[in-house]
Amino acid sequence: MQTNYFKILIILLIPLFFGCSSNSGNKKETNTSPAIYYTEQYRPQFHFTPEANWMNDPNGMVYYEGEYHLFYQYYPDSTVWGPMHWGHAISKDLVHWEHLPVAIYPDSLGWIFSGSAVADLKNTSGLGTAENPPLVAIYTYHNVMLEKSGSKTPQSQALAFSTDKGRTWTKYANNPVLESPGIPDFRDPKVFWHNETGKWVMILAVQDRVHLYSSPNLISWKFESEFGKGIGAHGGVWECPDLFPLKVEGSDVSKWVMLVNINPGGPNGGSANQYFTGEFDGKKFTPDETNEKWVDWGRDNYAGVTWSNVPETDGRRLFIGWMSNWQYANVVPTTVWRSATTIPRELSLINQDNSYLLVSKPVKEMEVLRGGTTPVYLSAQNISGEKEMSLDSITLSQSELIFDFNLENSSADSLGIVLENNLQEKLVIGYSAKQKQFFVDRRAAGPSTFSKEFAGISKTPYTAGGHLQLRIFVDVASTELFVDGGKLVMTDIVFPSENFTKLKVFSKGGDLLLGKAEFHSLKRIW
Ligand code: FRU
């Protein structure tokens, strides 16, 4: 009897000593009971968030053997930024995510800052075999000791590899593979295979510009060119670049698109992602235009880059961003975890008014989340003033809302929608026909004392045509607005004290013809 009691006691105590068995990097603060898993206040229901603790940039996105890998800047010991690791998750459909253990840990060379991952299918690095080629992660080491000592070279680029479909990662023995020429901001390598020259290309953020390097094997890198001095936006440091070709829709023309994140200096304050289109010959990027354009005009889409190795049969350029802003990322009022990614988006390029415009659409896989409750379809109706929409069983705080406004037959100066809760906290998303601009107003959307930068109106120049289509994803504490099929995007986080439950459409200065609308509840992914 006594031994049995002893055994039971040991079994009960084991989890206390070793932590609960878990497939995540760290979940000591979360409750994994299915009934309450991922239900804390402000917890997104269909966006990726780590189970616990701090996340920033998405990193190392690569598709391999049926799995989309998502790594991310992660600090497993706190809900604020600190010594960076690469957290890790995988998905088969870009919508449902499985947490995997932390992939890459800091070491004596430094913390593990942002970077990319490639499938080295020809085993050019020799880090796998011809039969079992490696996945190779290329990341930045940030050495705090060097930084504190005033060194001009605290950042360098390094490799880690996996030969088991990304489940375990080994650091390359001769790291780093690329050291700084004496510039402290020297980071965030994005690497891709350039077919025409038969080489790997690395684009790297270097203070106020990018550097381009080439390599036959991911290990030895040759400087090729730089781009960006005096070009585009320069209100802050350049970070997390990307470079990839895109076909211009409806033509045979292919253009190279360069993404360059910048912090601060975004169009509505703080962090944002600018892009350039142009030509790239494997060594040098030549822009079509030298003024900046923005991937997203909202406050909360930063450090976004694209997946590598997406099969040609799929052919999409897939993007994901970090849904926050360095102005307040460390103090937003979530507990347990901090920050989410955006929903994954498909990027495309169109020619508009003799300029190339980057278009972002939610990936089509998002549609699998529809159908939790019966959708609502509304037919044409006139709105003057403010009108509450009938939602039936739609859960507004976890929904997809589609509106088609017939501006040809409207006289309104400004129009839009309001998401509201029972405390009269409201988020307004609207279009001013008079000023030709979109706006997202979160001034009255809930408490914002955590940061004086948070509350405000974001504005974007936009000229609507006769029909204006809005597609909005609402997920508890965020809205992602896609206008006219993704020609304009605004991503904004929001922290209402209670979930939004009321949806209103408004028109000011005249009548508005709402052509049709469609509302879907979206299922949770956890
Ligand atoms: C961008 C960034 C990167 C850096 C990482 C550190 O948000 O500052 O430039 O690698 O975050 O976490």
Image (tube, rainbow, N blue to C red):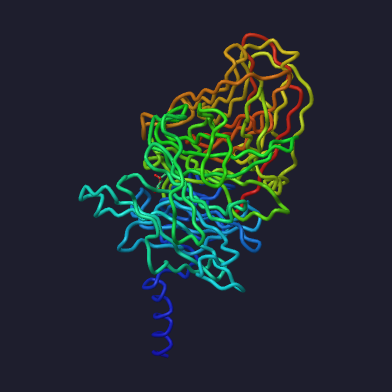
Q: Position of residue 421 (x, y in %)?
A: 55, 31
Find residue 316 and report its horizontal and vertical position in percent: 67, 47
User: In front here: 317 or 246?
Assistant: 246
In this rendering, does residue 6 appear at all? yes
Q: Is residue 321 left or right of residue 465?
A: left
Side (left or right) of 390 relative to 5: right
* Residue 370, image quadrant: top right
Along the line of sight, which residue is nearer the eye, 106 or 137? 137
Residue under the point 58% across and 52% down: 197
Residue 396, position in %: x, y? 62, 36
**Quadrant placement of the N terminus:** bottom left
Pick the front one: 50 or 347: 347
Which residue occupies the foreground of this view, 157 or 414? 157
In the rendered picture of this protein, how many numbered marks are placed on residues? 0
Residue 84 seen: no
Q: Position of residue 234 (x, y in %)?
A: 41, 30
- In the rendered image, the quadrant that contains the C terminus is bottom right
Quarter holding residue 491 = top right
> Would residue 90 be found to the left or right of residue 161 on screen?
right
Residue furthest left in the image: 149
Please state if 179 lies on the left or on the right of 88 as rendered: left
